[in-house]
Structure formats: C-alpha cells, structure tokens
Image (cartoon, rainbow, N blue to C red):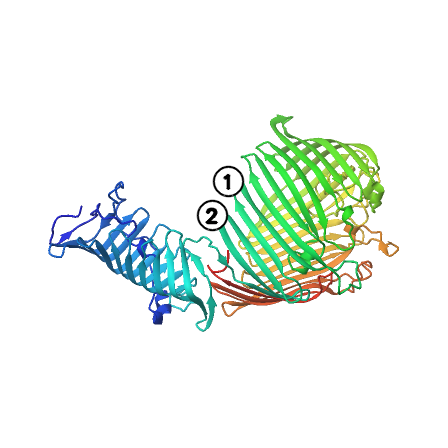
Amino acid sequence: MLPAAMTQLHVRKLRLRSLPLPLLVAGMTTFALPGAALAQDLSHPTENTPIQGAPPAPGPETADNVPVAFEADTVQYDQNGETVTASGNVVMRKDKQSVRADTVTWNRNTGQIVGTGNVRVVDQNGNQLFTDRAELTDELKTGMMENLLLVLREGARLAANKGERLANGDVVLQHAAYTGCAVTDDEGCPRNPTWRVLAKSVIYSEERSEVRFSDARLEMFGAIQLPLFGLTVSTNGGAVSGFLVPDLKSSPSNGIEVAQSYYWKIAPNRDLTGTFHVFTKSAPMASFEYRALTDLGAYQITGYATSSNRISLSDSNPDPNRERALRGYIFANGKFQLDPAWSVTASIRRATDRTFLRRYDISRDDRLRSSVEVERIDQDSYLSIAGYTTQTMRSGQDQGQMPIAIPVIDYRRRFNESLLGGKFELEANTMGITRKDGQDTQRAFASAQWSLRKLTSMGQEVVFTGLMRGDVYHSDDNDATDTIIYRGQPGWQTRAIALAAVDVKWPLVGQVFGGTQVFTPRVQLVAAPKIQNLSIPNEDSRALELEDTNLFSLNRFPGYDRFEDGVRFTYGVDWMFERPRWRIKSTIGQSVRLSNMATVFPDGTGLTNKTSDIVGRTEVRYRSFVSFIHRYRLDKDSLTIRRNEFDMALGNNQTYLELGYVKLNRSIDIETVDGDSTTLEDLRDREELRAAGRVAFAKYWSMFGSAVVNLTNRSEDPVYGSDGFQPLRTRFGVAYEDDCLEIGVTWRRNYVTNGDAQKGDSFMLHFALKNIGVH
C-alpha cells in the first residue's frame, strides 16, 4: 500500500507493494529521435554503470500483487489530485529490471505512471533505455515515450521520436534511426556513425527480443542511401532469421557471380542458411549449411548442387557442346561426447568430380578424406576405433589407388605401478587397407615400452628406454604399387622388433648479455637388432627426411611400417637465450651409425650413409613484432645446403610482412622411364617462395596481398617442367574496416588451368555491417 497522506517526507528504501510493475520500462524498450536530429540523438551520452542506490530485492510475488523495490529522496502526496510524486534519484527495481528517473508521478484515479527527467531503464537482457518522459498505466498494457534512445547490450543504438505500446505488448516507434557503430571517437568526442538505418516505423517485440523495420533505408557516410527490405535485428545479441548481405564475385570459369543467402533460425540450437548463386557464364547453383547443437555435441552439413558442363582433366580439346552433368559437393562433420570417456567424431567430404571445388572456389584441397572415429580416453588408457576413405582431386592420379582404411584400431595402456623404478606402457594396433585397383594390406602389432628417468647429482637428465614389438602383415596385389621399395612381399609376413636406448641431457644455466642462457649438450645411444623391413609393405612411413624434430627420435620413420635398426650414436646441442623482449633458441645435431648393416633409408633423406647430414633449427623472436625461424640440413662432406627453409613474420596485427622460402636440394640422380621420373615423389627437389603482407593507412584503410611462386627449374625437376619462376597464385586487395563496417575488393590470379577450372583473374567484393546481414 502507498503511505498515507503526506505533505513532504524524506524516504529511504520505501517499498510500494501494490504497484504492478513488470518492468517500469519494459514498455519503454524502444527508442526514437526527431527526424532532423537522428544522428545527434544517437550520439547522446549514456551511462554504462549499474544504477546506483538500487534498493534491496522485493518480497515474494502473489497472484494479486507484484512487488517493486522503491527508493527516492522525497515523496509528496496531493490529496486533491490523488497523485503521489517521488522526486530525487528515484530508483525502482523488479527482478533483473531497474528504472531510474528524476521524478515519478502516480495518479491513483487513472492508474497512470509517468517518469520524467533523465529516465534510464535497464531490462532483463541488459539493454538500456534513455528517455525524457515515459508514460505507463499501472498494468503496462499501453505506454507513451518521447525522445527515446535504446542502447542494446551488444553496443548498437536505436533512437526514435515517439514510442507507443500496443495491446499485445509490442512497441511501435515512429521516425527511428539505428546503428551498430560507435558514436564517439577515441577521445570521447561525438562523431557521426559510418552507417545508420533510417525507418519511418519500427516494431519492438520484447517477447521475441527483436526489432523489425518498415520502410527502411541504409545511409552510409552520411550520403549513400540504399533501400532495405524485411530488416530485423536482435536485441539480445542472438541471431534472427532474414536475408544476409549478398556476395559479389567474378571468375574466368563462371563470369560474374551474385550469391544471395537467407538465414533461418530454426531454434536456439539449430539454424539453416540457404544460398542461391547466379552466374553469367554458367548455370545457377544452390547451396546450404545446416548447423545443430545437441545435448551430446554438435554437427553441421554443407552441400552444393548445380548442373553444368564438365571438362575431363585429360581432355585437351573439349567439345563446347558437351552435355551438362549434375555436379556437387557434400561436407558434414560433427563430434558427440557420449559420456566423460567415450566420444564419436565423424566427417564426410565427397565431390562429384575433381574440378568442381576449384571451379566454384570452394576449396583447393588435393584430397578429400571422410572418416569416423570412436574414442575412449581415461586417465591411464586410450582406445581409438576408426576408418577413413580418401578421394583424390589430383590430375593424373588413379582413384583406384586411393586407400580405404577400415578398421584402424589403436589401444594404449599406461600402468602406474613402477616396474624396476620406471614407467610401463602397452600398445596394440591393427589396420586394414583395401584399394579398388591397388595393393591391399592388413597389419596388426603389439608392443611394450619401459622408460626410466633419473637426475644425477650434477644435474644431468638420463632416460633409459626399452621396447619390444611383434608385427603381423598380410598383403595382396603388391605389383600394383609403382614404387618397388613400398611393396613388400605378398602373403603373410611377421616381424619382431627390440630396442634399447639411453638419452643424456645436461642443461647448463648462466647469465650473459643481460639475460639468461641455457646450454644443453645431448647424446643418445640406440641399439636394435637387424629387422626385416623391406619384406613388409610400407603404407605410412614414406615421407622421411632427417630434421631437427626427429633427430633424437627412437624411430626416425614417421609411421609403424618401417623401423630403424642397427646401433647409432646421436649428439647435438640445444641453446636458448632469454632477456626482456628477446628469445633465441637454436638446435644442431648429427648421428653416426656404429653398425655395418645395410641402410633402409632412401637416397636424399640425409640418413643414407653411416654418418648423417647435419641438421639444425634457429628461432629468433622480439616481442610479438619479429619472428624468424630457420631450418637447415648440411651435407656431411661438403657442407652443401641440402635443405634451406625459413619463415619470417614482421609487424603487428595492422601492418605486417610474412615471408617463407624453402629449397630442397637432395642431390639425387634423376632417372626417367618413358618420360616418367623413377625418383620417389616424396623426395623430389623443390624451391618455393611465399609472401603475404598488409599495410594499414589512414586509420581505417589497408592494402593486402600474397603470392606463391614455384622457383624449381627444369634441371631440378624435369617432370613438372618449371622454368625457375612460375607464379602459382597471387592476390591483392584494398579494404576499409572500422568498428561497424567492412568493405573490401580482392583481385586474385590463378596460373594453372585444371579441367574446367580455368586460369585467369578473379575479383571479389566483400561487404559486412556489424549486427546486420551476418551470422
């Protein structure tokens, strides 16, 4: 009940329990401005701090009474007019909603509530309403507002001249302006927004947390105006259904492309985006993306479909009247956590042909892998049951040679109980590979590994390792594999592996050049008896080269099908220097085989002779401004550089330069048979340069570009016939980006024609508005 008649009373934390107030400004959650001063009103200063002096939470709600916490400096009661006026820092709160005003007047006869003077309302979603005057009934069924400004939780602003609440709870605003841009500069001074939406009327729905615009237009830079149809924005930061900003591109294969997307928010955890692509030089294309989040995980499905002419990769004289074919691509992936230990991960990637993805600029991957994997992980064990298949996108590669691996099972178990003071781990693995027109291989093995780590009194770290493994293989159609050393012997094959190793590191720490250095000499001795490697098919140990990352590995082959035997001694040095803002790390090392066993390493790997090549890596970093990484391999006899690779990044997030260079000079004699090279594909010489950069200027503008150039000459690789400078891809663009607008134009050139994916120039226009037309 309201207090009895008073002339003037200073009240603190006075509660009005009979005033039904579902949100004194829930009916005021839409905002407007006079048409002639919209920009100025959007720039009106606002508060971001919570309403101070808010009273304690109200008491329990009943069917006939909605309590509202109330506080004011003074309260006056006019007996003649039957009005109650609260003045001075008036604060009201209900649930998560709060209201502040200079004055609030309640007419007991009409039930009308009017807040005036610096009215500020915060709703349950964190949106803030600022207005000069708000008029409500005690039930908030209808209400009037004047000079309104709504600041949404995500930073956008909506201003209007007048607002009125309808009987269904929606609020209609007249002559409204909306923007997602900042209205002040870095110094806090007012500025005109880059863009704003002007509308004759706006409907705000508190129930759906969205704002719908009618008869709207987009104004950019205070001059450009474009019509907008069916525009809806969210007030709680979530997505809403509607059309997205269209994409505009051009390419030599398809001509000019216009892509219009529609976003459908099916449910809070599911959405669908459908896109229709129109081209000037090819048939239209449709695509979709469906996303869902469930209690167990998330998944997405993406698809493309069209009917267009297709040129075979081997067709040098294509028929212009060739028939159309149904073409498309499907990509789906997801992960589900069934319980804390078990999970399922799956991915599907399939295309109707090898050039579809490149022609429509969807992907440049040369292989598409589809897989499914079931995993169980706990503190001491790991189990994986998986399968995968691969579709090649490469020209000249036989799809019948692509592997289908099922099942691929890997189980590992670590035992906490100490065995001779060390740790003990078991592993079991099996894999079956089939090919339509190639070699089939099945493999199974079990291994046990023991390791013991000790620290000496002088600070050396010593690690002892023992390993035992037994393998069983079966293979068919071995002659279908072109590379002889990969085939193995057909039928059943068995293999036993044993290994013993000791690894010693001695870190030495000291001060130098105003910083700290750690100098760590390292030696390793590994012994394994002779192993029958070449009788075993090689499916997963083909891409081999000595480098800093595998120098001290127990097995320097990357997979399971090959295992390094014999006795070898490896030595090297790690050095690290750190001081404020600087870090330098360097590694160098070499290995020597002490046994006279024949090597299984191919030429060009750096491991063919008893003494290996010298490998190293150096990394230099200065804050986040400079990063330089250099990897190298030197010939053990002549110190000729066999591998020279560096990656450099210079700059910050706004302006930067990235360079990458690699040259592989493996010194392998190249032999050809019927024009085809017999050199292993994984060990061919290469030289390539990569560059990318961005230059920011005029605060919001930038230029960017990138290039990939093949520097391999004909003598290094006669198969591909490069002339020593062959650009593969180049890109250049200009962009404008501020806090609420992105505009960019990109030019790209491809230098290789691949079927109906033609070489030539492509252009793309990028346009995005914050909070509008994106998801």
For residue 579, side relative to residue 373 (left or right): left
Q: Residue at x 76, y 32 (%)?
A: 471
Amino acid type, mark 2: Pro
Depth order, front residue of 571/10: 10
Q: Residues within 10 Å of mark 1 (few under 14, many from 20)?
A: few
Q: Is residue 328 above or below residue 767?
A: above
Residue 138's disc number: none
Q: Residue at x 68, y 35 (%)?
A: 409
Residue 295's disc number: 1
Position in image of residue 287 (x %, y %): 60, 55
Q: Is residue 596 above or below residue 707?
A: above
For residue 364, side relative to residue 343 (left or right): right
Q: Is residue 455 visible?
A: no
Direction right: furthest residue: 674
Residue designated by label 2: 268
| Distance Cα–Cα, label 2 vs label 1 | 13 Å
The answer to which of marks 2 and 1 sits earlier in the sequence is: 2
Position in image of residue 510 (x %, y %): 58, 47
Q: Secondary structure at mark 2?
A: loop
Amino acid type, mark 1: Asp
For residue 742, side relative to residue 331 (left or right): left
Position in image of residue 249 (x %, y %): 61, 65
Q: Secondary structure at mark 1?
A: loop
